Image (cartoon, rainbow, N blue to C red):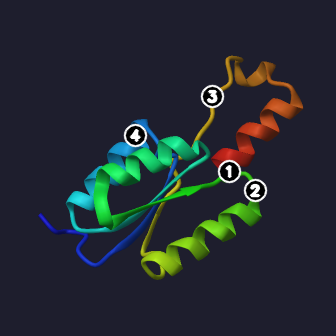
C-alpha cells in the first residue's frame, strides 16, 4: 500500500504507544516521517526501526522554540511537512477539577 507515497509527516509523541504505531503505519504507506519525542532514546529507537524513511528528533512540544526547530529539522531532512500528528500528551494522576494551576498549565502546554 502506498496511500501516503511522497508525503512528509511529523508525528509527536512517536517514541512509543500510539505515536509509534502511527509512525510505523505512515512509513508502511510510503511517507517519510520525523519521529518526535521528548525522550531522545525512544525517538531514536523508533526511527532506527523504520529505516531511511524516518528521522528522530527530540522535542518538548510545550516549548515553541523546540517546535520551530522540529519543523526546521523536517524541512532539512525530507522537505515541508504535509501532515502533522500532534499525538504528544501527558497524564496527571488527579481529576481535572482538582488540578493545581501549575498542573493544568503543564497539561495544556503539551496537549495544545
Contact between marks 2 and 1 (CB within 8 A): the answer is yes
Label 3 secondary element: loop
Is 44 located above or below residue 83 in the figure?
above
Task: Please give the residue where the numbered disc 3 appears in the rendered image.
Answer: 91
Label 4 secondary element: helix
Q: Determine the CA span between mark 2 and mark 1.
A: 6 Å
Across and down, in percent, residue 48 comes to 36, 52
Across and down, in percent, residue 7 comes to 33, 75
Task: Please give the residue where the numbered disc 1 appears in the rendered image.
Answer: 60
Q: Earlier in the sequence, mark 4 or mark 1?
A: 4
Contact between marks 3 and 4 (CB within 8 A): the answer is no
Tell me the quarter of the image containing the N terminus: bottom left
Across and down, in percent, residue 44 comes to 46, 50
Q: Please give the name of the residue rendered at 61% of the width and 46% of the height, measured from the top-left corner.
A: 38
Which residue is at the front of the view, 105 or 64?
Answer: 64
Q: Please give the name of the residue rendered at 25% of the width and 70% of the height, measured from the top-left corner.
A: 4
Task: Please give the residue where the numbered disc 4 appears in the rendered image.
Answer: 18
How crowded pointer 2 is (Cα within 10 Å; few <14, some 14-19, many 20+) is rated as: few
Q: Earlier in the sequence, mark 1 or mark 3?
A: 1
How crowded pointer 4 is (Cα within 10 Å; few <14, some 14-19, many 20+) is rated as: few
Task: Please give the residue where the numbered disc 2 appears in the rendered image.
Answer: 63
Q: Quadrant of residue 52?
A: bottom left
Amino acid at each position: 500500500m502506498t496511500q501516503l507515497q511522497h508525503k512528509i509527516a511529523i508525528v509527536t509523541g512517536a517514541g512509543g504507544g500510539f505515536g509509534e504505531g502511527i509512525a510505523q503505519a505512515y512509513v508502511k504507506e510510503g511517507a517519510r516521517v520525523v519521529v518526535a519525542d521528548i525522550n531522545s532514546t525512544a525517538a531514536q529507537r523508533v526511527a532506527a526501526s523504520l529505516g531511511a524513511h524516518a528521522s528522530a528528533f527530540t522535542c518538548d512540544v510545550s516549548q515553541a522554540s523546540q517546535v520551530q526547530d522540529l519543523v526546521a529539522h523536517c524541512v532539512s531532512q525530507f522537505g515541508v511537512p504535509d501532515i502533522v500528528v500532534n499525538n504528544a500528551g501527558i497524564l496527571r494522576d488527579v481529576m481535572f477539577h482538582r488540578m493545581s494551576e501549575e498542573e493544568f498549565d503543564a497539561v495544556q502546554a503539551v496537549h495544545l
